[in-house]
Image (cartoon, rainbow, N blue to C red):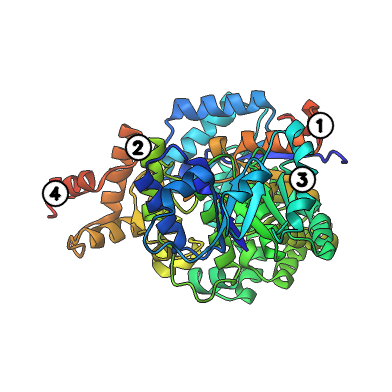
Amino acid sequence: MLVPHIHIVDTTLRDGAQSPFIMFNDKEKIAIVKMLTEKGVYQIEAGIPAIGKSEQEIIKKIKSACPNTQIAVWNRLNIDDINISLECNADIIHISIPVSYRQIHEKLKKDETWLLNEISEVLSATIGNAKEVTIGMEDASRAQMDFMLTVVRKVQQFGISRVRFADTVGIMTPSTVYDQISKLIKATGIDVEFHAHNDLGMAVANSLAAVQAGASFIDTTIHGIGERCGNCDMDKFIFAASSIFNSNRSERVKGGEHNG
Amino acid sequence: MLTDATLCYIENASKQQQQLILRALGKLPIEAIEITAPVWENIADMKNLPQKKYILRINNYKAIRYYKGFYRYVVTAQEPAAEGQLAEQPMYASTGVKCSVRVVGLSRKTVPDMEKTFSQWRKAKRDISFEPLNSLYQATALAFAWHNYGGQSVSTFCGIANHAPLEEILLTDYLAGNMAAIKGFNFTILKKTLEAITDTSIPANKPILGNAIFAVESGIHVDGIMKDPQLYEPYPPELIHAKRHIVLGCTSGRKSIEAKLRELKLNCCKIDTAFILDKVKEKSRSLCRSITDKEFYDLVEMMGRV
């Protein structure tokens, strides 16, 4: 089988830390980032600056302790959140955009037109101020493909080259993952990052299917920690991917340095 | 079509425990229950044996003579012995015993890889049961995919013996809309009995079975769940006889504080939730963990608000 190129995006300190009963102190967070960097993880999602001052401070400390690591921070589609993030010296500003009808109408109490206008406004204000911006499609697994394509095309107009496809509630199966991601890539040519949750015990299998469909970035956490049943377990995924894709070459996981 | 083989792997459990497991399995929407001869000896005299198809796992074709009347027999054998035994198969086929194929393992194949194989299996019109193993963490996905093709998948409760966890396949099937008539799943007895047999606790975040899978701390998610639980939950906790639980900690928000005050029946009208949130985060950081309901109550009490 052709060996795909997979970039690991670790979200232990963001989505993993949302797991109730698990909490890291500052020393542990820095130690984790150092270990992940040594392991060759491509990108580390270090937190949500909008949570508060202490979160902003630790993100700055992490970046300063690991200057060569690609540090990303998570944001809502909200310019105030992003302005706070821009002060944290992160390499990547990740903006999460709800894309399912339920998230747009029930959570935001808005509609699709409002969302598309908001994307334009927020991205206009962000691009140029951030080194890199990536977009997360929250609840993509329950969204309409047509609307996701509209969102992707809209963000592409601002030069965004990577979107995260989030199975927010962990309900996908490998067949649906393969089908959805193939369609997304075929229609837009965008780089896809897949974000799995393990509610049905399929986070690793779904991430493998995403890779086969063309996703080149896979989100993981250490030991699969995360809210509810957790996220895709990094070690399990790497072990399964290297066994299945028949490669024990170290470059299957792209290094922490920014090497394109 | 689903077969559960849990009982094949708890031969050392007591007769009572095996019967408890069988009764609980009997209430689940599965087609067949696979057992071994020693387990059959323990359950054969049960009153009201659950109305399921029973499959007997044997290691020699000759055992069929001694255990008659099963829906199907599965012959397991070490490789050298298996070759010789296969020669015996036609003889039993001619006597009316159903002969089918059991595929075990295939853990190195992904679901997209297996789509073609499943299609071929179906076209072949052979009776193939598939027992994927979980060595590369794909057993649930593979078992569900074959089941979804109309095939017979073999799993075990909680995935014991490196199998696909039965409960994960059932919930996936439910969410796929294939079990419209089902009102809920109760895994409580199965879970407690298995924990007693194996003398271990099921991890708190184990899909479907974990005690903490409906605990939520993130302020953004609590806010969403308060508006509509489906925003951040794959299915209602009640479906599996579980309860949602709001946990307070570093990632909590004001909505979490309000929800917890309501849950603890504390009058929140005169309480400065932003101030309490700061205190909760401070305490959580100093303890390096989320805070308990008792600690939260004490915090509010200390501030003279109770």
Vertical placement of residue B127 versus A255, above or below: below
Q: Residues within 10 Å of mark 3 (few under 14, many from 20)?
A: some
Residue where numbered disc 1 is placed: A247
Secondary structure type for disc 1: loop
Residue A4 x, y percent position in the rendering: 82, 41
**Which numbered disc flags the more N-terminal residue, 2 or 4?**
2
Q: Are marks 1 and 3 in contact (CB under 8 Å)?
A: no
> Which residue does the numbered mark 4 point to in the structure image?
B301
Q: Secondary structure at mark 2?
A: loop
Q: Chain of mark 4?
A: B
Q: Are marks 4 and 1 in contact (CB under 8 Å)?
A: no
Label 1, label 3: how many angstroms apart (C-alpha)?
Answer: 41 Å
Which residue is at a point 60% across and 60% down the rendered structure image? B71
> Alpha carbon of mark 4 to alpha carbon of mark 1: how far?
59 Å
Which corner quadrant of the image does residue B281 belong to? top left
Q: Chain of mark 2?
A: B
Q: Residue at x 31, y 33 (%)?
A: B287
Corner quadrant of residue A40? top right
- The C terminus of chain A: image quadrant: top right
Location of residue A233 with respect to A74 vertically, above or below: above
User: Which class describes the residues within 10 Å of circle 1: few (<14), some (14-19), or many (20+)?
Assistant: some
The foreground one among B191 and A6 is B191
Q: Which residue is mark 2?
A: B289
Return the disc, 4 or 3, that comes first in the chain's sequence.
3
